[in-house]
Image (spheres, coloured by chain):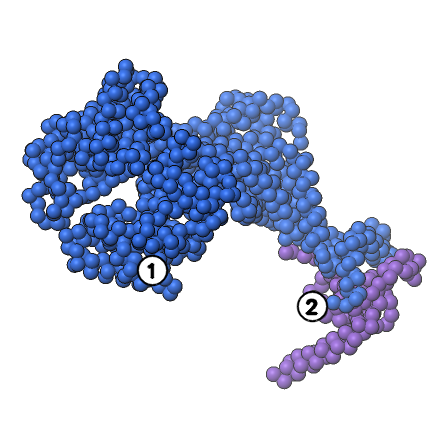
């Protein structure tokens, strides 16, 4: 670029107005010289002026081309367009608000969903190279995933070369009590192998995590690592916490480190981590551990899986009693932690929000087209004066981009308000509490804004800047048939999208209703649940102290006024833990005949308290010390089909396992996952197992009135115990519904928004067509058409695209119904009541939003409208 | 993108290619400073009315050449006492004219040869 060229460019950028003026003058002087010349040749002034102008051509076009050559042109235009667009926004305030509102709602919903999906699915786990992490399961002879045992895990850890680390995780948190100043605080704890943190690649924020010292076999380790949350709340964020000895269940433990803020493995939120060392002497068939491992450098998942399978097969040969038929499963950790169904649910909600956003865009495109129709005259004039189509497109697109960014800002504001609210709902979705409006969400907003502005602006702008022909034949404001058709199609699209979303919401609602009304097999009214955790140092598991404590607790509770019955169970309804094992009929010798079951340790009286019907036989004896069991009807049918199970012997765990006599059969229950088929269940006497963490269930008319007396009994039995936690069965059942409830709430708010947007769209189109045809309608009224007839005509005509859209939406819903199936409980994706309901609802909304503006036509005064133009 | 066309373009008058118009403008300005209207008249006269400069493309061409630095302009008064913008060749423009004339001659000679021989 030469010096002169640079100077010219700079001048054009800095002094565009002067260049403009010069260009004006240059062209004017050209015209005058040409006119003079032509007059000199004998033309008269008017002729000369006319032919000179014709010879020069469109002045605006020439100016445009000249400006093109000045360079820096694009920026100038852009700036001018942005300023112009902002002015228009302010001038057409109502229109702008509707557009920004529509886009804001659509974008806001999309951003909230994005923030959720980002937190739950997209953001990598906060571990070192999370995609190299795996979770190890064993698989049962039936092929089900199952936890692993100490001895097996030790063998896997030593033998699988494809894993550089493999650490045990005791998945279910236990609740040891911290003794501090005479007060006991129950803490959620997780026991993990010493290499757990090294495997994940997580280092302590303070001090250190478990290391070699905790791996030594000769001395028991009493090291404890605190979560950031426990350190800051329970221990007041004391910097001098390292090396401090704390009393947990009567033993002194040394705090060696504090984890970084937000560290978390899975959905549980343990407050403290205790070291767990594998005990190879434990029964090999005792499956109770989970494990996390890291692929060794260079190892592939596929290769390591094969290697692990070979080792499992070898173990099965070596230890046929416990391992015959068992395999091993390596699962990528990110998928595994997410849990089944969460990814799918989020995917479906994300597509739903995509539809909603699309609907908002279509709606705005519709408004935009109406605007374009009003601006036809302006645009046509500019084309005739020589403005290039691309130049006008650029200007119109700038307007839609400005609008879209305003909409995105509104959407971001909406998301900022909604995200903390969703986090506060306390939904059981892993990592949902990490959801935040951050730079990623803002970036998503920008991308969505650009995309939607293109969707919104391109089609109408393209249509509006079409041919310049017919410039004279149309009166201002008269719309062309093509634009009318395009808008009808847009309305149909809106209705289709809205009906699709309404269908989805309707189905989820039906499913939620049936889920909420599920017969769990026990009654959930008027039952108070009390969680009791006995400290292990005073109450060794299955000791007489444990037995005595619970039998006295139940006995004394039963004497309280208002108590109908009471009993204790190890599994708190809908909370767990889910204990699993294997049983078989005594006469079975084949190891493969063992049936996977859930089991619970219970005291007598639990069935009566929870309302689980006793179908045959009797409850266990009151002392609960005999080897007797009550089993579920499903299991009875499985072990002794068609026979009376009472009095039969059931074998526990494996061929050499203990025998239990079946004394009773109770109804099947769903007490962990609502909607999942009931599992075969074995109830064993708490008297034999003597579990220290139990849930006391109390049937009563006055749950709230019993809290204080029961607390008194507990502290009377052992004044050193911390206060137990109370809840009702209804509350716990409601928790189990929280995830489907969230899906339902999200989907119904989407479909409500979609209905609003679609209604606004239909309203807009009809209102516009009424305003465009005022004259026409006035003539008809003047000629004697009845206003009622007119309104009916207008409404019906505009309902045609609504009907098409409805049809398309329902067909699409039928085609896509299968994808929803995984979220539905006892609800067909083609539920007729939902299809009908949606058709009816949208029909009503469509009619109302078409009738409302049409009814204005009846109020027209023909005297006025006919003279208007 | 439809360009505004001058109303009368005789059929036997060939449309000027853009590069050709640039060359003609440069050559015309070799005679001295001239304003836009005079340039178009002069091209028409010298070519015996064979070449009509489409005035719609004359000014964009002038501005383009000015931006490239081959011509420069200043406001002055015309023979009829009218204020007009006069264009003149720059040093760079002179060099460009020599180069482009050579290119043009090579090209037209080649075209003529093909037309005669082939």
Where is A47 relative to A495, above or below? below
Residue that mark 2 sits on: B17
Where is A756 relative to A159, above or below? above
Instruction: Give the residue displayed 75% in from the left and 77% down from the top.
Output: B99
Badge 1 density bin: few <14, some 14–19, many ≥20, Cα 10 Å = many
Instruction: Give the alpha-carbon distance from disc 2 to disc 1, as whole Å.
Output: 73 Å
Chain for numbered disc 2: B
Q: Give the image location of residue A456, x and y in percent.
A: 55, 44
Q: Give the image location of residue A273, x and y in percent.
A: 38, 44
Specify the chain shown as blue: A
Badge 2 density bin: few <14, some 14–19, many ≥20, Cα 10 Å = few
Instruction: Give the residue displayed 65% in from the left and 24% down from the top.
Output: A864
For residue A736, side relative to residue A142 (left or right): right
Q: Give the image location of residue A214, x and y in percent.
A: 36, 52
For residue A652, side relative to residue A105 (left or right): left
For residue A3, side relative to residue A263 (left or right): right
Quadrant location of the N terminus of chain B? bottom right
Q: Nearer the viewer, mark 2 or mark 1?
A: 1
Q: Quadrant of residue A11?
A: bottom right
Disc marking residue B8: none
Residue A355 visible from this viewpoint: no
Q: Quadrant of residue B103?
A: bottom right
For residue A342, side relative to residue A137 (left or right): right
Residue that mark 1 sits on: A163
């Amino acid at each position: 670029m030469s010096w002169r060229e640079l100077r010219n460019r700079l001048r054009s950028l800095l002094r565009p107005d002067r260049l403009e003026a010069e260009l004006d003058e240059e062209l004017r002087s050209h015209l005058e010289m040409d006119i003079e010349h032509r007059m000199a040749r004998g033309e008269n002034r008017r002729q000369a002026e006319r032919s000179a102008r014709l010879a020069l051509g469109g002045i605006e076009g020439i100016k445009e081309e000249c400006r093109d050559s000045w360079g820096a042109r694009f920026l100038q235009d852009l700036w001018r367009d942005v300023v112009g667009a902002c002015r228009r926004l302010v001038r057409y305030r109502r229109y702008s608000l509707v557009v920004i509102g529509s886009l804001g709602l659509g974008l806001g919903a999309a951003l909230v969903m994005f923030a959720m999906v980002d937190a739950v699915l997209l953001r990598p786990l906060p571990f070192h190279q999370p995609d190299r992490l795996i979770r190890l399961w064993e698989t049962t002879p039936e092929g089900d995933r199952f936890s692993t045992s100490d001895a097996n895990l030790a063998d896997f850890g030593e033998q699988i070369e494809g894993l550089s680390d493999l650490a045990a995780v005791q998945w279910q948190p236990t609740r040891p009590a911290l003794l501090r100043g005479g007060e006991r605080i129950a803490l959620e704890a997780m026991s993990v192998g010493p290499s757990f943190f090294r495997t994940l690649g997580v280092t302590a924020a303070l001090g250190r995590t478990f290391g070699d010292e905790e791996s030594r076999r000769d001395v028991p380790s009493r090291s404890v690592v605190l979560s950031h949350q426990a350190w800051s709340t329970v221990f007041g964020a004391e910097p001098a916490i390292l090396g401090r000895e704390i009393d947990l269940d009567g033993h002194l433990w040394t705090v060696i480190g504090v984890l970084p803020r937000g560290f978390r493995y899975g959905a549980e939120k343990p407050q403290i981590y205790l070291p767990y060392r594998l005990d190879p002497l434990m029964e090999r068939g005792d499956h109770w551990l989970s494990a996390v491992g890291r692929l060794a450098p260079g190892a592939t998942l596929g290769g390591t899986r094969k290697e692990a399978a070979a080792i499992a097969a070898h173990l099965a040969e070596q230890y046929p009693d416990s391992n015959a038929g068992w395999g091993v499963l390596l699962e990528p950790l990110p998928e595994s932690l997410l849990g089944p169904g969460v990814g799918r649910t989020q995917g479906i909600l994300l597509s739903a929000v995509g539809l909603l956003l699309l609907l908002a865009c279509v709606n705005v495109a519709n408004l935009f087209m109406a605007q374009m129709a009003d601006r036809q005259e302006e645009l046509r004039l500019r084309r005739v004066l020589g403005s290039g189509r691309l130049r006008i497109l650029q200007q119109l697109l700038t307007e839609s981009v400005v609008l879209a960014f305003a909409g995105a800002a509104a959407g971001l504001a909406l998301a900022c308000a909604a995200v903390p609210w969703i986090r506060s709902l306390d939904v059981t979705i892993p990592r949902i509490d990490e959801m935040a409006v951050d730079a990623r969400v803002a970036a998503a907003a920008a991308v969505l804004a650009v995309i939607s502005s293109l969707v919104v602006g391109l089609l109408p702008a393209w249509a509006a800047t079409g041919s310049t022909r017919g410039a004279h034949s149309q009166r201002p404001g008269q719309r062309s048939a093509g634009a009318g058709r395009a808008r009808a199609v847009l309305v149909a699209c809106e209705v289709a999208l809205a009906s699709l979303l309404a269908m989805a919401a309707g189905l989820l609602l039906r499913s939620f209703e049936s889920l909420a009304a599920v017969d769990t097999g026990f009654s959930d009214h008027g039952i108070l649940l009390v969680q009791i955790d006995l400290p292990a140092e005073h109450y060794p598991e299955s000791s007489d102290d444990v037995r005595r404590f619970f039998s006295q607790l139940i006995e004394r509770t039963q004497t309280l006024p208002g108590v109908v019955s009471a009993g204790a169970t190890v599994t708190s309804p809908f909370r767990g833990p889910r204990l699993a094992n294997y049983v078989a009929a005594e006469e079975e010798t084949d190891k493969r005949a063992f049936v996977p079951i859930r089991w619970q340790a219970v005291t007598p009286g639990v069935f009566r308290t929870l309302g689980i019907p006793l179908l045959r036989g009797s409850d266990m004896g009151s002392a609960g010390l005999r080897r007797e069991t009550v089993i579920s009807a499903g299991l009875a049918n499985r072990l002794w089909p068609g026979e009376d199970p009472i009095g039969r012997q059931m074998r526990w765990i494996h061929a050499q396992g203990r025998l239990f006599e079946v004394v009773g059969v109770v109804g099947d229950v769903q007490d962990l996952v609502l909607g999942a088929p009931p599992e075969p269940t074995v109830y064993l006497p708490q008297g034999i197992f003597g579990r220290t963490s139990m849930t006391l269930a109390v049937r009563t008319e006055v749950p709230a009135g019993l809290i204080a007396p029961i607390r008194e009994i507990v502290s009377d039995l052992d004044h050193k115990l911390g206060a137990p936690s109370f809840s009702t069965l209804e509350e716990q059942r409601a928790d189990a519904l929280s995830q489907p409830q969230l899906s339902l709430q999200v989907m119904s708010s989407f479909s409500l928004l979609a209905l609003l947007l679609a209604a606004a769209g239909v309203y807009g189109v009809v209102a516009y067509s009424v305003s465009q045809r005022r004259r026409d309608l006035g003539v008809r009224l003047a000629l004697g058409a009845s206003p009622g007839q007119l309104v009916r005509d207008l409404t019906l005509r505009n309902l045609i695209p609504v009907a098409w859209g409805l049809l398309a939406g329902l067909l699409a819903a039928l085609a896509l119904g299968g994808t929803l199936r995984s979220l539905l409980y006892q609800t067909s994706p083609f539920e007729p009541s939902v299809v009908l309901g949606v058709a009816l609802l949208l029909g009503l909304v469509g009619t109302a939003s078409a009738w409302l503006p049409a009814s204005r036509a009846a109020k027209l005064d023909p005297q006025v409208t006919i003279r208007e133009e | 993108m439809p360009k505004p066309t001058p109303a009368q373009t005789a059929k036997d008058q060939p449309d000027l290619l853009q590069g050709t118009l640039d060359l003609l403008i440069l050559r015309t300005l070799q005679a001295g400073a001239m304003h836009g209207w005079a340039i178009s008249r002069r091209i028409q006269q010298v070519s015996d009315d064979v070449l009509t400069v489409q005035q719609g493309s004359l000014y964009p061409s002038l501005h383009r050449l000015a931006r490239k630095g081959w011509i420069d302009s200043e406001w002055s008064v015309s023979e009829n006492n009218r204020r007009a913008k006069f264009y003149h060749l720059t040093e760079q423009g002179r060099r460009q004219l020599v180069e482009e004339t050579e290119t043009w001659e090579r090209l037209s000679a080649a075209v003529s040869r093909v037309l005669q021989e082939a």
